[in-house]
Amino acid sequence: MPTHNADIAAIFTEIADLLDLQQANPFRIRAYRNAARIVGELGREVRAMVERGEDLTDLPGIGDDLARKLREIVDTGKCRALDKLHAELPPAITELLHVPGLGPKRVRMLWHELDVQTLEQLARAARDGRIRDLPGFGAKTEANILQAVEAHLSKVRRIKLITAAQYAESLVAWLASASGVSRVEVAGSYRRCRETVGDLDILVIAAAGSSVMARFIAYDEAAEVLSHGPTRASVVLKCGLQVDLRVVEKAAYGAALCYFTGSKAHNIALRRLAQEQGLKLNEYGVFRGRERIAGADEESVYGALGLPWIAPELREDRGEIAAARAGRLPQLVQLADLRGDLHAHTTATDGHHTLEEMALAAKAQGLSYLAITEHSRRLAMAHGLDPRRLAEQCDAIDRLNEKLDGIMLLKGIEVDILEDGSLDLPDASLARLDLVIGAVHSRFDLPRARQTERILRAMDNPCFTMLAHPTGRVIESRAPYDVDMLRVIRQARQRGCFLELNAHPERLDLLDSHCMMAKEEGVLVAINSDAHSADDFVHLRLGIGQARRGWLAAADVLNARPLPELRRLLAQVRR
């Protein structure tokens, strides 16, 4: 069975969790967690590296032992080290670590004191009032645990877009090689670039007698065949993701692609528009009476309704049909529009490659400038920079720029916004920089008013340039902190500073709705990779998808500007 990066990352994460429960060596635990993060965010498949015989120890944080385990997982789909841990611990106990507020220490106590080993047992213990008496818990924590467990048990499973992409791209390639297949495309929320995906809808054009259906249900990663017919089939992959395949006739392909791309609300609005014109719209085409007048491609479907084609990312029934009728659809930003990246880290803090390596990697992605924005000193775990080390890095950037060709490094910092709204470094140190990105990395639990005032005060600093990952959310791990984003966006407009759309696959922050707000208020957004390695610049494509969902055009994106114009805009922010 092909092993994807997401599978490897899941194995290493589970090993780290189980070692944590055993109170193993913290350095060993950290090594597995770092390896899981690096592999999970890697822009190329480890499987392909193994097949090509590449040295896996070239990956940051991967030594000989982890490299051997990577090859073992790729070759067998399993890891003996994980099997050994499973034999030593209750099989379902790692599920408890996914409950907000429960770390390894608390899970160990629940296990040893109350014999809680599953989510169901945890919910029962909370309902019975047995958790509140444990040291460090209490009635409020018990209530929060119960609420979180019930939400977790009732939630429909969705996976992050980057993880879905690994499975979708492999499956599309597998189906495209079937006899008689002329087109394969993934529809649904995947095509609309939603941050998470519940399942995959794949459409195929295939000649009569094609082997595509047989090839689909015989796919190595298919764990269960739910249904199988001549034009439709459904399977569940071994990762738990359901995939639905439909073979569609060429004359109806555009209508089917539109229908299965969705969203449901967008489709309902289109059908209503068709009815107003005496037409019928469904997955087989646009009909006037019994005559099909459109359907071979999406352009013909929208054209039959008097509309220009609407990009999939906009299809959420948030005004896109009215904008299309009025000729006001934006020319959405594309990856090729980006001239640079304004948020990246190196080995000076928690990055994995040097200044020069990051510069050359950005250049290889077609970028002409890159801002180096290390963490500031408060983020001690990331080896954040103090004023002296920041000055040294500025000197190093100046020296490197003298020899670089085709790429320019900008001097920056990702400075912590402290609880009182002050910045983690003195203005005298920040004044030398091209840009200062403020970031909230602590006290996510502040009340809405205090969190908002904290950020507004930081934005008032004369050196402040941009707000990083503005809501602090980590997809499916940490909810956004409570902040009045409209006030923040209007403060950015008044102050003349910018907002980041962080393209890291765990963040995708700004939310699409906040991108729309920023556009309406005239605040420029920077689509940044937050790269910590030379492979991370590929994540910019995820940020582009999020920006397009937020209706952003190239004119709305700060780093779509050429360097001279960018420098003028950055200089205008500084007071």
Image (cartoon, helix red, strand yellow):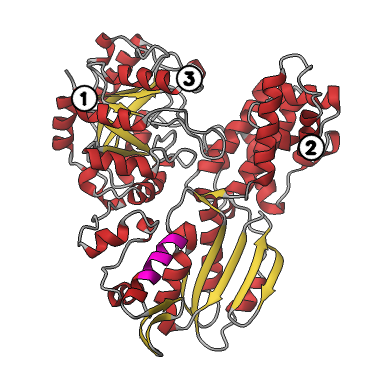
* Left or right position of 225 against 49: right
Mark 1 = which residue? 495
Prevalent SS, magenta region: helix
Residue segment shown in magenta = 264-272
Mark 1–mark 2 distance (CA, rounded to whole Å): 51 Å
Q: Earlier in the sequence, mark 2 or mark 3?
A: 2
Mark 2 = which residue? 118
Q: Does 12 sit above or below residue 205?
A: above
Residue at 36%, 32% (x, y): give it.
485
Can you tell which quarter of the image residue 278 is in?
A: bottom left
Residue 256 is situated, as x and y percent measured from the top left of the image, at 45, 74
Q: Nearer the viewer, residue 305 or 39?
A: 305
Callout 1–callout 2 Cβ contact below 8 Å: no
In this rendering, the count of numbered labels is: 3
Q: Is residue 206 at least partly visible in the picture?
A: yes
At label 1, the amino acid type is Arg
Mark 3 = which residue? 446
